[in-house]
Image: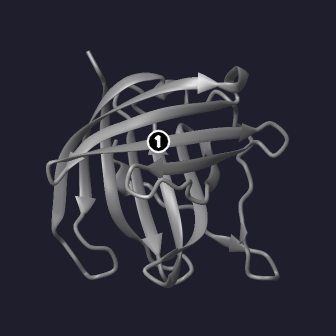
Amino acid sequence: MKSDSLEIPKIQFDENGALLIVASETSSKDDFDFFQGKSVIKNKKLKQRFANCTEWIEFPSTQEMYKILNGIGNIDNFLATFDGEPFEGMTVRLFNPKTKLWSIYWADSTTGTLDKPVVGSFENKVGHFFSEDIFEGKNILQVFRWDARDENNPVWSQAMSDDKGKTWEWNWYMYMSKAK
């Protein structure tokens, strides 16, 4: 089961050009249950984005996730070391019971700000979450993919597009396993 072989769902826009995101029929507040607890992670991150770069940086990290808000949300802490300096990230995931969409927010010890959320849902144990954003002054689309088909070894990955989703550049993979 390779995450790379999965296709990114086709992007849809409304009449004003805004990104349209609709939940899958099976989307539920329990979609992230596989990720509860502690994980050890092998990270593979592209050295430069949108630069035809083929050099990857690999590093270990840990993560711990727990549910909040009576199960309609969860939080995790991501701990790593970059260039000898400690780095901490935090994700807040919130499930909207009305729309059945997840919103995923990220903050880290570098910026101290909460990023715009990526929004989406799971289908057949694979989740795709999208946002419109700006990277180095360029309008981009971003996608987070959660591949939980192997719940004991989920894979998170991130891609960006600078051409409205016609092409995507994968720039970060996290290969996770439960901490012993």
Q: Residue furthest right?
A: 98
**Which residue is tagged 1?**
90
Residue placed most toward the observer, 132 or 24: 132
Whether residue 147 is situated above or below residue 32 in the rendered picture: below
Residue placed most toward the observer, 124 or 97: 97
Whether residue 109 is situated above or below residue 124 in the rendered picture: below
Q: In the rendered image, which quarter is residue 177 located in?
A: top left
Indicate left or right for 89 with 107 as reference: left
Indicate left or right for 88 with 81 as reference: right
Q: Which residue sits at x=22%, y=67%?
A: 47
Q: Position of residue 29 (x, y in %)?
A: 69, 30
Q: Position of residue 101 (x, y in %)?
A: 72, 46
Q: Which residue sits at x=64%, y=54%?
A: 119
Q: Tell me the quadrant of the picture where the C terminus can be found.
A: top left
Could you tell me which secondary element the residue under label 1 belongs to?
strand
Whether residue 17 is situated above or below residue 101 in the rendered picture: below
Q: Which residue sits at x=47%, y=33%?
A: 76
Residue type, label 1: Met
